[in-house]
Image (cartoon, rainbow, N blue to C red):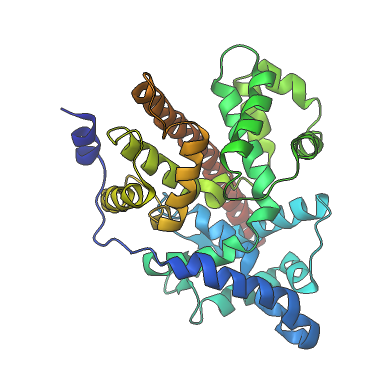
Amino acid sequence: MSEFTERLLTSPRKDANDRFRLIWLIVIPLIAILFQVYVPRYIAFLSYLELPLLITVHFALARRSPIAAVFYGMSIGLVQDSLDYLERKQTPMTNSALRLRTADGVRAALDALSNGHPITCVEGGREPVWRIAPEDEHQAAFYRNTLIDAFLETSIVELALAYAARAEGNRLEAFWSQTMHLRDLLKFDFYFADSAAFREHVAEEMSWHGDWEAHVAAGGDEINVLLRAKKPLIAGAMLRPFFEAYEIVSDVLRDAPAEIDEKDLTKKALGVGRQYAAQDRVRSNEAVSALLFATARQVAADQHLLEPAADLDERRTAFRDELRGILGDMDTVEQISREQFYAREVARRIVRGQSA
């Protein structure tokens, strides 16, 4: 049985495959950013429209996972984690974002988003549940894209920690090497501070955890302790579509001509990507995107994978496997994040039962 057949037979199938809409990643994020920056200056009460930003990030974590929806109490905790992080980073925030510190503020935001927006409220049970329906996935993505830069560095930290936990040899060196490598892979999709400043930012964040270098150097469970103490854990919500797009292109390159042109590569990647989405081999339909495939091609070119060479096939396969390893690290982070979700919900129910 081939690898393709095995993965096809063992992967769950979806009833429908949402098509990617390029406008969500180009026009709407631009409009949202301009609105966020300028409109509240003149019409103050419209600043409440920033409320969906932080919440939508966390709903994305549960997309196609065992947690199909987010409970109200869990939403409050997740938002607090994000606000704590942004405050610790001294990221400027508006009063509307700070209102998410209260349970009433979170509930108001959820109610607003479930009224014709990308969040669906499911009622009729013991308590309301909110989720992002498959048909609203692309609409929800533009909210994430307007604030992704604020969580980019911490997402890379999470993936580098997961990589170091499985690395052999000097784990601290592996952590820093992977941190800078991930920055290099993502440089065509994001703007980063220069290498020295970026490393300084990462070191500052890691310094929040006492004796972090010793924990990383110890590897294994010691690194997992760091990951479990880290909040929020959002690498999957922030970066999965990008790395899944890179993986699709790298997979297409494995049997493509050495100097395949951009148009042919994009066409083949779209075809393979749609099949992967139908087979649930990618978790987000965002990954099947001509826009992301264009930057994925730049990544491949930067790795010298579009030039004839005697070892080209081996290097293309190795690159594909490397990207799958990164996605595996993302799975590890998301598993720990789900455990945080469950623990928070259990604690919330215990408190509610004691007060009843």
Which quadrant of the figure has residue 50? bottom right
Q: Where the C terminus falls, by quadrant?
A: bottom right
Give the farthest residue toward the bottom: 43
Residue 316 picture location, percent across and down: 39, 29
Could you say where residue 231 lies in the image, as x and y percent from the top left? 68, 45
Q: Image height check: is 89 above or below 29?
A: above
In this view, the residue farthest toward the right is: 90
Identify the residue shown where x is 69% and y is 22%. Answer: 216
Q: How many marks?
A: 0
Q: Is residue 151 visible?
A: yes
Locate the N terminus and report the quarter of the image it occupies.
top left
Q: Is residue 126 visible?
A: no
Would residue 90 appear left or right of 234 to someone viewing this image?
right
Q: Residue furthest left?
A: 1
Name the residue at 26% across, 53% down: 278
What is the x, y in percent for residue 47? 73, 79
Closer-to-camera residue (351/185) = 185
70 sits to left or right of 203: left
Instruction: Report the residue that reaches farthest toward the top.
Output: 169
> Who's the residue at 46% across and 34% down the image?
323
Tell me where residue 320 appears, x and y as whole percent.
Answer: 40, 32
Q: From this view, report whether residue 232 is shown above or below residue 124.
A: above
* Residue 154: quarter of image: top right
Q: From what the image shows, is residue 305 above or below residue 235?
A: above
User: For this view, does 185 lie left or right of residue 248?
Assistant: right
